[in-house]
Image (tube, rainbow, N blue to C red):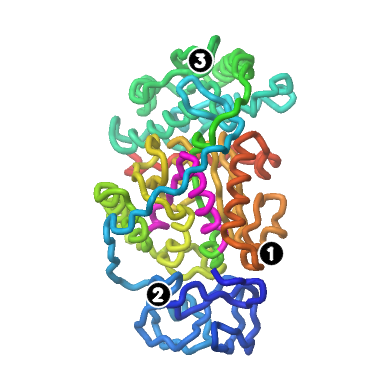
């Protein structure tokens, strides 16, 4: 990437016919791109695109050396390029399956963090007690139980990070054993097994379609914490059996109180960085996301993989338009075909409702300079770094492969991150250009800002500033900074969202199918 320290705009690839403003620019400003000077015909904001040569109507517009759409009218040099003169159109992508499989990165074998080693071999970065609702009908009861355990109530349990209610809006009105039921079971089972959950309680109504007995059997649930670190069956409370809400709340409070001493009886130990399962997500993206925060996170992702760990890329609708970059580095045809199948499924699924995937980017994304889904996706997949794509998994399916993995999910942040957690992510890094303030317990979320202005404006919420890349820092330097932050947070350092006490309301399983 060029040195941005003295630049007004950045030209990302020799083949690009646009550049990107790295500051707010006034009309009439002359910007230098290589050996040419282009005069702006109108003001252009940070993160937005500028034509550096004439682009004919119907001709491709190139960013990152890739097609991001086609000109809907003739565009003159120095013109602002956005929704008024650019759209995605239809074009063929060369998947070139498994044609560019990269070699494994040089191993990093000496990095560790302080984590909680569980009896099943997984490693937690936090130590919560979970209250898992089987159905929305028990969601309020779960929250009422959790609210009884205030910081003062937990003061004697220094090794317990909190009591979290994993409540949601699903669990009934679905076909028994059908797709929706299976998806919800995967999410709830993944949270029960999550290494950041030291012990958990299952709370149901009693007549729901998502029966707790089925969940336990389907997911093979046990408690991982207990006397002598033994495993045993989960504790279940059913409102209809106990006599209603008040009695269930009191029973839940008593059960959690009994759990706390043994959950507290655990210490952090030194574990290799190979135990990191990194969940990557972007929200409130802008035109700089694919230039700063996302490629820097890609560097950190590569480092986690080099340590022997796992990095999960998700948000399938925000891979659409850039999936060919991943199929080329898939380790096998089978892995590439799984990704292509998911892309085709999303096109079909969106079409059922008369929706096109190019309806994403959002209004806020467009305000930040993103125009088409291809442009957004080309920047988004940079979070996955440069290593081989090792596997593609279904939503909330347990991740079993080390290296880079794609998990199918929506682009909407709450269900996307919920799926990452259920799949086993023990740290999340969330990049944002507009200023998303996302967090989701029981896993810490590190937020990375794409530009300095937003980082400084929202300093209470942002953990790392990648905007320095626009001021001369290298992508590699910021990537190493993110990697170090991952290990520090995994060892117990609090993120900004944790200091603010955020993350109780964002748990949101993705459920496909009709509500019956």
Q: Which residue is mark 2?
A: 87
Q: What crowding class fits label 3: few (fewer than 14 Cα within 10 Å), some (14-19), or many (20 or more)?
A: few
Q: CA distance from mark 3 to mark 1?
A: 55 Å
Query: Which residue is disc 3 drawn over?
Result: 243
Q: Quadrant of residue 354?
A: bottom left
Image quarter (top left, top right, bottom left or bottom right) of the C terminus: top left
In the depicted view, which residue is nearer to us: 182 or 169? 182
Q: Earlier in the sequence, mark 2 or mark 1?
A: 2
- Asked whether residue 364 is in view, the answer is no
List the residue tagged with mark 1: 453
10 Å neighbourhood of mark 1: few (<14), some, or many (≥20)?
some
Q: Nearer the viewer, residue 208 or 62?
A: 62
Among numbered discs 2 and 3, the one appearing first in the sequence: 2
Residue 386 makes an appearance in the image: yes
Q: Residue at x 42, y 75 (%)?
A: 62
Disc 3 secondary structure class = loop
Q: Is residue 323 magenta?
A: no
Q: CA distance from mark 2 to mark 1?
A: 29 Å
Residue under the image location 46 percent in, 54 percent down: 385
The reply to whether the C-beta atoms of the residues labelled 2 and 3 are less than 8 Å apart is no
Q: Which residues are magenta?
A: 292-319
Q: Secondary structure at mark 1?
A: helix
Estimate the x, y position of residue 287 in percent, counting from the top left. Answer: 54, 67
Residue 307 is covered by the magenta coloring: yes
């Amino acid at each position: 990437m060029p040195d941005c320290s003295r630049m007004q705009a950045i030209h990302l690839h020799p083949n690009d016919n646009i550049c990107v403003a790295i500051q707010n620019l006034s009309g009439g400003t002359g910007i230098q791109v290589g050996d040419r000077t282009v005069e702006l015909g109108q003001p252009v904001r940070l993160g937005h695109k500028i034509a550096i040569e004439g682009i004919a109507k119907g001709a491709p517009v190139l960013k990152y050396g890739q097609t991001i759409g086609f000109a809907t009218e003739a565009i003159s040099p120095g013109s602002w390029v956005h929704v008024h003169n650019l759209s995605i159109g239809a074009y063929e992508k060369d998947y070139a399956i498994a044609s560019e499989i990269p070699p494994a990165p040089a191993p990093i074998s000496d990095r560790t963090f302080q984590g909680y080693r569980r009896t099943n071999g997984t490693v937690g970065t936090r130590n919560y007690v979970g209250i898992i609702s089987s159905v929305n009908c028990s969601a309020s009861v779960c929250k009422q139980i959790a609210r009884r355990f205030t910081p003062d109530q937990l003061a004697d349990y220094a090794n317990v990070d909190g009591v979290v209610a994993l409540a949601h809006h699903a669990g009934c009105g679905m076909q028994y054993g059908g797709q929706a039921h299976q998806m919800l079971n995967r999410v709830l089972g993944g949270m029960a097994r999550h290494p950041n959950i030291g012990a958990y309680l299952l709370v149901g109504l009693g007549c729901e379609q998502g029966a707790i007995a089925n969940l336990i059997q389907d997911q093979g649930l046990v408690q991982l914490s207990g006397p002598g670190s033994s495993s045993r069956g989960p504790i279940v409370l059913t409102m209809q059996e106990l006599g209603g809400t008040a009695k269930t709340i009191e029973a839940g409070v008593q059960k959690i109180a009994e759990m706390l001493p043994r959950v507290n009886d655990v210490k952090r130990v030194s574990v290799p960085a190979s135990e990191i399962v990194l969940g990557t997500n972007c929200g409130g993206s802008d035109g700089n996301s694919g230039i700063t925060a996302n490629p820097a996170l890609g560097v950190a992702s590569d480092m986690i993989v080099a340590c022997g760990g796992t990095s999960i890329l998700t948000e399938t609708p925000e891979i659409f338009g850039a999936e060919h970059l991943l199929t080329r580095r898939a380790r096998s045809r089978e892995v590439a075909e799984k990704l292509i199948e998911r892309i085709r499924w999303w096109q079909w699924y969106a079409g059922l409702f008369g929706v096109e995937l190019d309806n994403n980017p959002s209004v806020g994304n467009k305000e930040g300079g993103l125009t088409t889904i291809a442009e957004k996706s080309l920047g988004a997949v940079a979070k996955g770094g440069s290593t081989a794509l090792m596997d593609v998994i279904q939503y909330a399916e347990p991740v079993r492969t080390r290296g880079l993995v794609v998990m199918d999910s929506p682009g909407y942040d709450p269900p996307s991150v919920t799926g990452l957690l259920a799949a086993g992510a023990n740290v999340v890094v969330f990049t944002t250009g507009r200023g998303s303030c996302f967090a989701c317990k029981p896993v810490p979320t590190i937020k990375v800002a794409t530009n300095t202005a937003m980082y400084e404006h929202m300093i209470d919420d942002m953990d790392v500033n990648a905007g320095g890349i626009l001021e001369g820092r290298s992508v590699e330097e910021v990537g190493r900074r993110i990697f170090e932050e991952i290990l520090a947070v995994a060892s117990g350092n609090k993120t900004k969202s944790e200091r603010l006490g955020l993350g109780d309301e964002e748990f949101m399983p993705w459920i496909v199918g009709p509500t019956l």
